[in-house]
């Protein structure tokens, strides 16, 4: 039987379409090799996290032309505007819950890490109660949580890193379409990635210069120490253990401690390796300043297929956006802004808060600007473009001190 198929971008898929071919090998997915009918939101989320486009059989399911929101050239203007207005509204609505989630994990992570360090028993229920509110908030809208994170002063690296890796791991899992229960497990593993660091000599962690070969070996020992501490606490979960044991393995086999490569690295550990690297790069360390979020993503993207699995890096960038929430950016008119929320439909046209005028003088009143809605309304600001990302603290701008 002949198949009449259409190529469809994944953001244009909807229920009722019959997927007969992917842009990758079927064996990389849980779907049947002969094709399947899209019936659930979970299937849509998984496809959007895995593929760029698919092919649909119009004889066995809905044709692309039959979908009212699919038109030549993309979404109709009104639909795209409503879509982003809904996203912006969701950010505002989610902020109170995101704030409570951030308070919960900030309070909880200190006690949890200290308990691991002392060898005390850490109840599984306490860990779950600490990360579940974060996951729930991220599932509803990740921009709200990351916006609040950007406005907070960073505390000691170990605690900030634990919170950030918790949120980033869950966010990447969300992008991949994983169920919420698995997102909780990823969040737990992300929070505990570096518990072994607390038992390293203090001088290694605070050294303001590049580590010697011997110090690097000592530092790498935090992986084994972390696993030992986790088991001392009488805890056991395969996702957390995989993340603790293998988050420094790399796609090409150049990582440690076992030199695993490719598919031999468990998926949770591949996720952990990405979020651990990213947060370390965008955090200030004794031996170097923090990188701009955009620059860190670009650097990691250049290492796709070598240090990191290509498909996962691409999905990580999709999840965080070209200019992640909290990024300082310079506009084409010289003004400086901070990214507040992403626009999935047009990733280079996010919502932001204008902080300075064109001469880099801080505004007396900060002004919100939604680039995509400016385009839709044909406002003068539609001419503005983001020309570059800025390092944290550029022009003396520290978001946590601006009362945004």
Image (cartoon, rainbow, N blue to C red):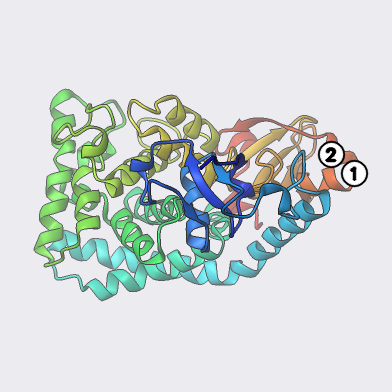
In the figure, is residue 334 to the left or right of 158?
right
Residue 276 in sight from this viewpoint = no
Q: Are marks 1 and 2 in contact (CB under 8 Å)?
A: yes
* Residue found 22% across the figure and 28% down from its top: 253
Marker disc for residue 382:
2
* Residue found 20% across the figure and 57% down from its top: 238
In the figure, is residue 97 to the left or right of 387?
left
* Residue found 47% across the figure and 37% down from its top: 314
* Residue found 34% across the figure and 45% down from its top: 271
Nearer-the-camera pick, 160 or 178: 178
Q: How many marks?
A: 2
| Residue at the outermost front position | 1
In the figure, is residue 244 to the left or right of 350?
left
Is label 2 in a helix, a strand or a loop? helix
**Residue 15, image x, y percentages:** 58, 59
The answer to which quarter of the image holds residue 191 is bottom left
- Residue topped by disc 1: 379
The answer to which quarter of the image holds residue 220 is top left
Is label 1 in a helix, a strand or a loop? loop
**Residue 51, image x, y percentages:** 49, 41
**Residue 36, image x, y percentages:** 47, 53
In the figure, is residue 254 to the left or right of 61?
left
* Crowdedness near tag 1: few (<14), some (14–19) or many (≥20) residues, C-alpha within 10 Å: few
Above or below for 43 versus 124: above
């Amino acid at each position: 039987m002949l198949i009449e198929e259409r190529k469809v971008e994944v953001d244009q898929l909807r229920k009722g379409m019959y997927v007969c071919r992917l842009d990758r090998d079927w064996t990389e997915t849980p779907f049947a090799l002969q094709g399947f009918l899209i019936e659930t939101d979970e299937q849509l989320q998984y496809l959007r996290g895995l593929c760029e486009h698919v092919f649909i059989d119009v004889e066995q399911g809905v044709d692309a032309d039959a979908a009212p929101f699919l038109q030549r050239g993309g979404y109709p203007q009104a639909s795209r505007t409503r879509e982003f207005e809904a996203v912006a509204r969701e950010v505002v609505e989610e902020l109170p819950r995101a704030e409570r989630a951030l308070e919960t994990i900030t309070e909880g992570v200190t006690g949890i890490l200290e308990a691991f360090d002392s060898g005390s028993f850490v109840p599984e229920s306490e860990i779950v109660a600490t990360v579940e509110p974060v996951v729930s908030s991220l599932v509803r809208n990740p921009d709200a949580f990351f916006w609040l994170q950007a406005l907070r002063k960073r505390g000691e690296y170990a605690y900030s890193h634990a919170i950030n890796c918790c949120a980033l791991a869950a966010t990447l899992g969300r992008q991949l379409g994983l169920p919420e229960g698995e997102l909780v497990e990823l969040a737990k593993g992300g929070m505990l990635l570096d518990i072994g660091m607390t038992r390293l000599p203090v001088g290694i962690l605070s050294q303001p210069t590049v580590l010697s070969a011997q110090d690097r070996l000592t530092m790498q020992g935090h992986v084994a120490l972390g696993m030992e501490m986790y088991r001392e606490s009488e805890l056991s979960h395969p996702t957390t253990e995989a993340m603790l044991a293998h988050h420094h393995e790399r796609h090409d086999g150049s990582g440690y401690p076992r030199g695993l490569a490719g598919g031999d690295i468990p998926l949770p550990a591949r996720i952990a390796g990405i979020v651990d690297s990213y947060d370390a790069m965008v955090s200030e360390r004794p031996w170097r300043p923090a990188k701009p979020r955009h620059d860190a993503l670009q650097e990691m993207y250049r290492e796709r297929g070598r240090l990191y699995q290509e498909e996962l890096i691409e999905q990580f960038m999709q999840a965080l956006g070209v200019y992640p929430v909290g990024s300082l950016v310079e506009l084409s008119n010289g003004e400086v802004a901070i990214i507040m929320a992403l626009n999935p439909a047009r990733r280079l046209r996010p919502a932001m808060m204008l902080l300075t005028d064109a001469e880099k003088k801080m505004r007396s009143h900060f002004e919100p600007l939604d680039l995509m809605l400016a385009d839709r309304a044909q406002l003068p600001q539609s001419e503005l473009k983001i020309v570059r990302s800025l390092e944290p603290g550029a022009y003396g701008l520290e978001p946590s001190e601006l009362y945004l």
